[in-house]
Amino acid sequence: MKNFTDQQKGSLMAFVAVMFITPDSLFIRLSSIETWSLVFYRGAIPFFAVFVGMLIIYKFNFFSMLFTSGYHGVIYIATFSITNIAFVVSIQNTNVANTLVMIAMAPMLSAILGGIFLKEMPDNKTWTAIGITFFAAVYIFYDSLQLGNILGDVLGLICALGLAVGAVIIRSAKNKNLVPAAVVGKLVVAIFAMFFIETYVLLEKDLLIVPLMCIMCVAIPFVLVTIAPRYIPAEEVNLFFLLETIIGPIWVWLVIKEQPSLETIQGGIVIIITIAIHSFLKLKKS
């Protein structure tokens, strides 16, 4: 990694993160626990896993990194926690497609916020990629869009805004390690879920599926996505996460034979090609 440019480091981290995230929807479908139990474990297990890992690597410097992150760390803890909770509650209160289309706005919101607060105006290639991928996401979910519960739709927008704000905060604090703040954010998520959880019991296949999901699809990606914006603009990081729109359903199709729609395949191909071309041009330039 030392020989990589910042563009190569950030792109690689964002890509690896989304590859770990892609089986997430499959694991959620395979699990049988109720929503708030899932939210609790998706907060608690990554918290303990990454906290222990950082104590081993950094020892008590973990706490100094946390306290020296200043207002960036405080804002990121709040943003990270709200985003995680808003995603779950949004899906509970509106059509899933509505939430996913809202989240597809994250790269666009990142670009706008980055331009306003960081003076990092995206180039024409990035704006083009953002526009194409957003409309491809709308195309994928168009038939599923409904007039949902306003609370769920608003929370979906808050989730997209949270992703954008979080990436911009990390970008603005390049010299600070905000992974400790993200760890605390996961603890906040777990504590919040405890007010609504019905049972902590994991039975049969959930004893394997839930911990595996929480480590592979949550803990590893959130570390990588907390580091990636230090190297590349926020909107570029969030662009990579639209890959989950097509790769996630492919995992579900391969394992439980739930075939993705023609729109998912067509829109997904457009998203993959667009991000691949955009990344190639950026890496070539770097």
Image (cartoon, grey):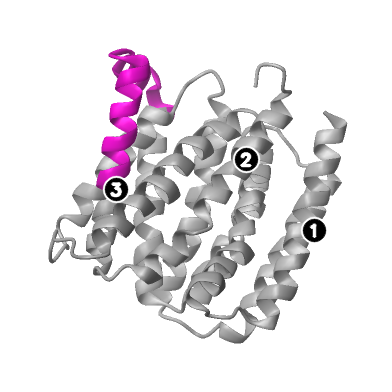
Q: CA gap, disc 1 to disc 3?
A: 33 Å
Q: In this figure, which residue is indicated by the disc labeled 3?
A: 43
Q: Earlier in the sequence, mark 1 or mark 3?
A: 3
Residue 234 is tagged as 2
Q: Is residue 123 above or below residue 171?
A: below
Question: Who is closer to the viewer here, 15 or 62?
Answer: 15
SS for tag 3? Answer: helix
Magenta stretch, residue numbers = 44-72
Residue 212 percent coordinates (x, y): 36, 51
In the rendered view, tell whether residue 91 sits above or below residue 159: below
* Horizontal arrangement in the rendering, residue 119 relative to residue 34 (left or right): right
Mark 1: which amino acid?
Ile
In this rendering, which labeled residue sits more in front, label 2 or label 3?
3
Where residue 224 appears, x then y in whole percent? 51, 36
Q: Which residue is mark 1?
A: 273
Mark 2 Cα shell of 10 Å, populated few (<14), some (14-19), many (≥20):
many
Q: Quadrant of residue 228?
A: top right
Residue at 42% across, 37% down? 76
Q: CA distance from mark 2 to mark 3?
A: 24 Å
In the depicted view, which residue is nearer to us: 28 or 147?
28
Residue 113 visible, this angle:
no
